[in-house]
Image (spheres, rainbow, N blue to C red):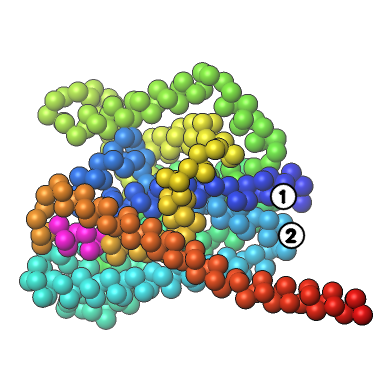
């Protein structure tokens, strides 16, 4: 195996930029999932074509490649596949718990408050009349309750990741080309997974796999490719082109909120404005790659800002992203209920958003603290063993 790949992966291990981005994505996903929330106007999707979901999927692929890539190189495919499937089971178990409790709460609240429109709003039609059938389809990932689509997508992507990782380790460019080909074919022939009771997945996994594999491909790129990327970042013209594209995306996204003004030419409206988030429109991919290109240039691995106290909550949320994401799903539902049953004012929207992010951060700190407590007995046992050996050698 190429030693450059192992070296590159070792260099990426513990990169706080990944934690920072995952934390930002988790916070933005929560804000975006609370309907009619003015605070969500501050998230990524309001300033360009891509959004928090794009960031979450790309960084998820990058992080998975860093975590399991070295294991694949050192311990082989079988061991690595079992570790990936262990993580996959954790994701699926989290999804099951979320799905069962989530739809039960929605059904209960809808019945008690006589707000039947909640069932339609949260895409759990049939839970009252066909509870068992809805649960079965949900366990098979065929239901699409609101706000669980990202976790469903991640489960499918992790299920195929052992084969993708094997391909990226042995033939990275060929595997990346295959991912691009699948993306193009899925868009051309409208490939997608079906959902219950009708329709298709919100986030088409045949298309969204492109961002996940792109993230993994960048993480596993050899030393030569990384040097080429750093060289490209030094060209002011490329950086200027990326900034211009981001500016164009910003102008079009803002102008699209005021269609009556007629600010957007017809050509741009037909080519760039259809969001097509389901099938990951090409201009979304380009927009996100432009953001990633500039972020990697402006924020180095050893950036001093990682020590700023203000960023520690975001970084901690990124380190414990699964627990934070699951908490965010429940909190977005709770925030929605608060806003539709109470005073839906700007102040209430700010309070709901602040409370949700605060609770998510508290969950992250608790999980991090709990993990440290689990590790302490092992450290003490190692210390006792070392002291025992030292005493035996002294005799």
Q: Quadrant of the C terminus?
A: bottom right
Q: Foreground residue, 252 or 351? A: 351
Residue at image location 63% in from the left, 51% down from the top: 13
In the rendering, at what x and y percent does residue 379 appear? Answer: 66, 71
Q: Of all residues shown, which one is farthest toward the right? A: 395
| Element on which disc 2 rests | helix
Q: Quadrant of residue 8?
A: top right
Identify the residue position indicated by label 2 in the image. 74
The residue lying toward the viewer, choosing from 174 and 43, is 43
Of residues 94 and 307, the one drawn nearer to the viewer in this rendering: 307
Give the residue at mark 1: 6
Is there any visible trace of residue 175 in the rendered image? Answer: no
Q: In this rendering, is residue 133 above or below 190?
A: below
Q: Residue at x 41, y 34 (%)?
A: 287
Range shown magenta? 332-339
Residue 333 magenta: yes
């Amino acid at each position: 195996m190429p030693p450059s790949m192992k070296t590159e992966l070792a260099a990426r291990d513990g990169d706080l930029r990944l934690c920072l981005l995952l934390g930002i994505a988790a916070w933005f996903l929560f804000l975006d999932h609370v309907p009619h929330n003015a605070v969500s106007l501050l998230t990524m999707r309001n300033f360009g074509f891509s959004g928090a979901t794009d960031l979450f999927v790309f960084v998820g692929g990058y992080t998975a490649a860093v975590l399991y890539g070295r294991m694949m190189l050192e311990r082989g495919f079988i061991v690595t596949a079992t570790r990936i499937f262990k993580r996959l089971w954790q994701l699926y178990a989290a999804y099951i718990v979320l799905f069962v409790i989530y739809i039960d709460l929605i059904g209960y609240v809808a019945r008690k408050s006589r707000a039947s429109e909640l069932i339609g709003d949260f895409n759990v039609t049939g839970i009252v009349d066909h509870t068992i059938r809805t649960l079965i389809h949900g366990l098979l990932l065929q239901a699409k309750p609101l706000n669980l689509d990202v976790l469903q997508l991640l489960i499918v992507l992790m299920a195929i990741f052992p084969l993708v990782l094997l391909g990226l380790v042995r033939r990275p460019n060929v595997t990346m080309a295959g991912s691009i080909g699948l993306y193009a074919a899925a868009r051309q022939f409208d490939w997608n997974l079906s959902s219950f009771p009708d329709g298709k997945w919100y986030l088409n996994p045949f298309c969204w796999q492109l961002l996940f594999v792109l993230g993994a491909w960048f993480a596993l790129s050899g030393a030569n490719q990384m040097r080429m990327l750093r060289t490209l970042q030094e060209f002011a013209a490329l950086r200027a082109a990326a900034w211009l594209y981001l500016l164009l995306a910003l102008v079009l996204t803002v102008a699209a909120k005021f269609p009556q003004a007629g600010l957007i030419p017809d050509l741009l409206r037909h080519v760039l404005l259809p969001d097509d988030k389901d099938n990951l429109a090409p201009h979304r991919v380009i927009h996100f790659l432009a953001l990633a290109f500039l972020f990697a240039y402006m924020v180095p691995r050893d950036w001093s800002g990682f020590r700023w106290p203000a960023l520690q909550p975001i970084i901690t949320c990124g380190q414990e992203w699964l627990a934070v994401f699951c908490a965010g799903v429940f909190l977005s539902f709770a925030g929605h209920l608060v806003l539709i049953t109470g005073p839906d004012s700007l102040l209430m929207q700010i309070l709901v958003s602040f409370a949700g992010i605060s609770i998510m951060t508290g969950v992250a700190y608790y999980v991090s603290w709990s993990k440290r407590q689990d590790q302490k007995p092992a450290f003490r046992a190692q210390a006792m063993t070392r002291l025992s050996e030292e005493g035996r050698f002294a005799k």
